[in-house]
Amino acid sequence: MGSLIDGPVQKILLTGATGYLGTHLLAGLLESRDISVRCLVRAENAVKAKERVVHSLEQFMLWKPEWSQRLDVIAADLGEAFLGLTQAEFIGLGKDVDVIIHNGASVNYVLSYEQLKGVNVNGTQELLRLAEDTRIPFVYVSTLRLFDSRFDGVPITELDKVDEKGTTYAGYSRSKWMAEKLINLAGRRGLPFLIVRPGLICGDEVCGIPNVNDAVARLVKGCVEIGLAPLSALQVNLTPIDYVVKGVIGLLYHHNSSGKVFHLVNDKPTRCDDIMHTLKDMGYGLQLLAYDEWTQRLRDSAATGNNFLLPLLQYFDADLPRQSQQRVFDSQYTQSYLAHMGIEPSPVTIKMLRKNIEGMIKFGFISAPNISAHA
């Protein structure tokens, strides 16, 4: 279908700018002096909305004061008609915008589809209405959790269709799949679009600032709290944040990305054993247990405590390690698009894992190891 955008990019409309990926993506966009970004952020007013964005950038040590003049922040709500704006304000959002990057969503793996539909589906529909009315190219940040029910060992590629039954296990996955369907319909009506599906994002090796809201961070915190960690075949496809950000921006400018789906994921999985051994090596006095014993001890703690992992206890079933081994990704299609730009996923090394754990300590997400107690 050709290029997503004809001509230079000067102004971008971005949603989800205060989340982990959104904050790093915003910084990546503002690094170009030719680009200004208009962000939609939930807040009482525009002043508080901009404060939220700046605070998030500062939190990740990304903020540069000189960006302020190219950063326009509007208080809006993805769950409301016209995004919580007047009709005139809504129409004005598209003024001079060269592309919409829709990264905002309600990310919750426990809530039902009905509870998430307002933000994740209806919000996408509102933005598509704006894009189609003003012919603005549309970039949608989806998720590889659409394939969480794939345990067949067959490599998952960008060309695979999403199985409707596979999205019924979680309301979040279903809401993202329904949003993708709306975007594809808009594409058939002539709207230029592309869809990116990131993997499980971690901090990169340079700054290593972690995503403390993801499943791996929860696993780390839960293990540190209970003093127990699993040894098993459980694995995850951790993907460094720098690759995801560079990938989104690179695909934005690619001459042949329109109408396509891309997977920004590290195909080589990280074993959870490596994470647990890294914690041990850093001085955490964890008792390493077989997976079944660890899950039983975690369930036992549910009756007496409030471990950080308890809300996710339902996911730690006996078959999870085997299932994770059978979920395989092959993103060579996406990598072939990015290779000529020098963009490729970095391997997740022990050094990178240490950087992420150090970042969790720095954020106050987990306590530092009491090395003297275990010397």
Image: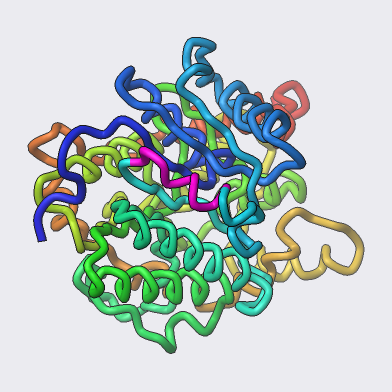
Dividing the picture into quadrants, the one containing residue 205 is top left
Quadrant that contains the N terminus: bottom left
The residue drawn where x is 31% and y is 81% is: 152
Q: Position of residue 325 (x, y in %)?
A: 36, 68
Left or right: residue 31 versus residue 365 is: left
Q: Position of residue 184 (x, y in %)?
A: 30, 72
Against 44, is 32 above or below? above
Q: Residue furthest top?
A: 66
Q: Position of residue 33 (x, y in %)?
A: 33, 17
Q: Tag count in the figure?
A: 0
Q: Position of residue 375 (x, y in %)?
A: 70, 24
Q: Residue furthest right?
A: 304
Q: As rendered, which of 226 and 156 lies closer to the eye?
A: 156
Q: As rendered, which of 177 and 156 lies closer to the eye?
A: 177
Q: Is residue 91 magenta?
A: yes
Q: Is residue 158 visible?
A: yes
The residue drawn where x is 43% and y is 78% is: 149
Q: Is residue 324 magenta?
A: no
* Residues shaded magenta: 89-97
The residue drawn where x is 70% and y is 28% is: 47
Q: Is residue 351 visible?
A: no
